[in-house]
Image: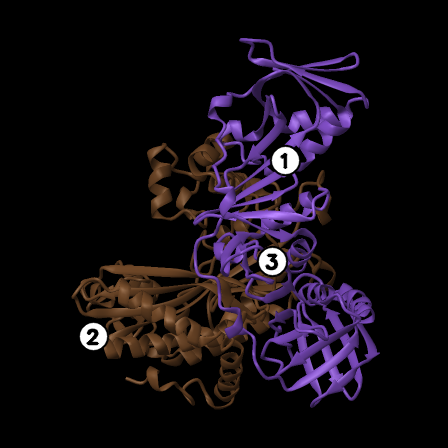
Amino acid sequence: MCEHMFVYNGSMSTPPSCPRASYRAVAHLDLDAFFASVEENLDPSLRGQPVVVGGGERGVVATANYIARRYGVHSAMPLRTARRLCPHGVYLSGNHHLYHRYSKQLMAILRGYSPLVEQVSLDEAYVDLTGTERLFGPVRRTARAIQEEVQEQLHLSISVGLATNKLVAKVASDFRKPHGFTVVPAGSEAAFLAPLPVQRLPGVGPALLGQLQDRGVRTVGDLARVPERLLRMSFGEWGEMLATAARGQDHRRVSPRETVKSISRETTFPEDVGDAAVLEATLISLCEDVCRRLRRRRLEARTVTVKIRYSDFVTHTCSHTLLPARDVDEVFFREVLALFRQGRQRRYRIRLLGVGLSNLVPRSWQDDLFDQEVPLLRELNMKLDLIREKYGKTAVRRGAAQS
Amino acid sequence: MRIVTSKADLVEALGIVGRAVSTRSSIQVLTGVLVEAEGAGITLTATDMEISVRAPLRGVVEATGAAVLPARILAEIAKTLSPREVTLERKAGEQQVDLSCGEALFSLRILPAEDFPRLPLFPIEEGFTVAKESFLATVDRVAASASRDETRPVLMGVLVQVAKNVVRMVATDSYRLSVKETPVEASVKEKIQAIVPARCLTELSRVAAGVAADSITVVPTHNQILFQAGEVLIISRLIDGQFPNHKQLIPENFESEAIADREEFMESLKRVSLLAPKSAPVRLQFEGNTLTISAQSQDVGAARESMPVQYQGEPLEIGFNPDFLLAGAAGVEEEDLHMRFISPLRPGLLRGQADDFLYLIMPIRLGE
């Protein structure tokens, strides 16, 4: 097990000229090869072997442990490709109930240190440690204590980035993985980021990276030297955000109430499917699922998206935006089926289907005179939700969702 | 062109045509007001291509002619002039108009008059007349329910139906719907109907209220409509499309009815709804002969108020958008407000003793 620390100018404390209270202390924590590590805990004989966890018979890689990564396996890679690269690896289909349980335990540990815990995904969270000094002592030591507690209690390795804001903390936790521990003191954010490749900044994906490289921007430092005006001209609002990010600034708060931008689910068939009845039943079932989650979060959605991946991996998504936001299954069934019928334009069999809801707003439940069935259907849906909460997700399903 | 008018007359005429001036300045000439001086008198015209307004300007024509002047600055100038005689003059061949009033002199660059759209010609003889007061009263009670959402253009209009002795208007933004029928003498041969932009009707109501005429002349064509009140003309395009069938939306039977003192109800509602900000609902609880109105706001607190009503039916709890409810109660205009309900999930109906005004409103589901 190795540990790393980034120390800029050898100084760990805040510069004396800056009052302490004006900085926040934000930690970003990210479990290392989460699913694979859980599997190794479950079966210690896996340690030292390449372990790949991926969905179903032919889905994609969800997590690969660090040994498997040496063979070039990475997440989101089709399992077939992974098998070619690392034929002697151990391939597991995963145990999501278990991962959820571990995730809950992790969040419970974090909440023991601060009420401001923002869960980003199963294995990733921000913790705002500002003001915890009087309880736990110096923030750096507290962050280290969290890392140790996760190791002891869950037997999982976690990487920690500690900085004055979310952006830098996130980059820092990724700085040296696995089991990294990187502290970026106040005032040295820009210097820390400058030598890193620009794609390390969250939000810089392949498309944007290409455009930046065309303009000669390779490192975050290069980006910081581009006048903001030019960035704004090239990338609009994004440009302003890039300029802020390149300076290591980020004013977002760590907010415990996660703000959901979209809710989606997809499924890869065990075998490619051409039968419209099976495909539509699957869509209904996915739609039931996302709508239930929508209501549980007390939201309404305006945009519905259907994702179709054909057997040759060509993927299409189509979406439609409703005039008023809705939270009733039946409204989205109509939309999803119409989108699918309109969007399926190739004769290939289908490998994967997905349904997503976005453009989410807090529910208002102001219904519409022109669709007076909606409130009645909502009551039905909420009753179904209660049954499912008590007896499980599959306790009641619509006939149309059976195939 | 040379005309002499007064400050007051200029301000009044500009006030009438002002709302038709385009606020989007993509076509520059539409930000102007057309001043025409002819033997018959002076007229001002403004249009934003959706509605056009033409109004007379009292004054003396000393030399005929026309010019398009920038409307906003002209209106601002007019307001600040001293209350005296105002002269507008465009010298032959010049691209400016001199406005003088006392010692003040403004030279305003004119916009190209040839670009200003001609108002369409209407076959006035094919129109009909309708009593002004009843027509405008109907507009005032209905038009506010029209939608402001440009994604549903039909709902931005008011359905206007005119028969020999009745005018009916319907407007809805899909959350509430108003219908008003007014007995009126109209010189129509057969029943006619059109979807008129709500904005045109509210403008008509504003302008025509100040005009000393008892009737309004209405000339509909297949895609436009002209209203004439006195010497003021308002022309609007009509909205094309299918207006929702209001008769289908209004339930025939209700389960319960409450009769409340309308003023008292509105006062209570206004108070309680202070604690229902944004789109939060107010809760109406009917039990026995008591209505309790309540609201709560997570961050601020809660409010409740009870009032006596005559209630027939099972106890009921139902939630509404307070603004919509208040607008409906205001539209009833009678002493007693009748409220009819089916269930907390079905629309409620507000009306008076008579059924000439109906206000249908969709509830908001109340949380636990």
Mark 3 falls within which chain?
Answer: A
Determine whether label 3 and label 2 are within 8 Å by CB: no
Could you say whether the residue bearing mark 2 is in a helix, strand or loop?
strand
**Residue B33 location, quadrant:** top right
| Label 3 packing within 10 angstroms: few (<14), some (14-19), many (20+) | many
Can residue A159 be seen? no
User: Which residue is labeled 2 in the image?
Assistant: A273
The residue at 35%/77% (across/down) is A284
Between disc 2 and disc 1, the foreground one is 1
Residues flagged by tags 2 and 1 on a common chain: no
- Mark 3 or mark 2, earlier in chain: 3
Give the amino acid at mark 1.
Val
The CA span between labels 3 and 2 is 43 Å
User: Which residue is labeled 3 in the image?
Assistant: A254
The residue at 41%/42% (across/down) is A198
Residue, far left: A347
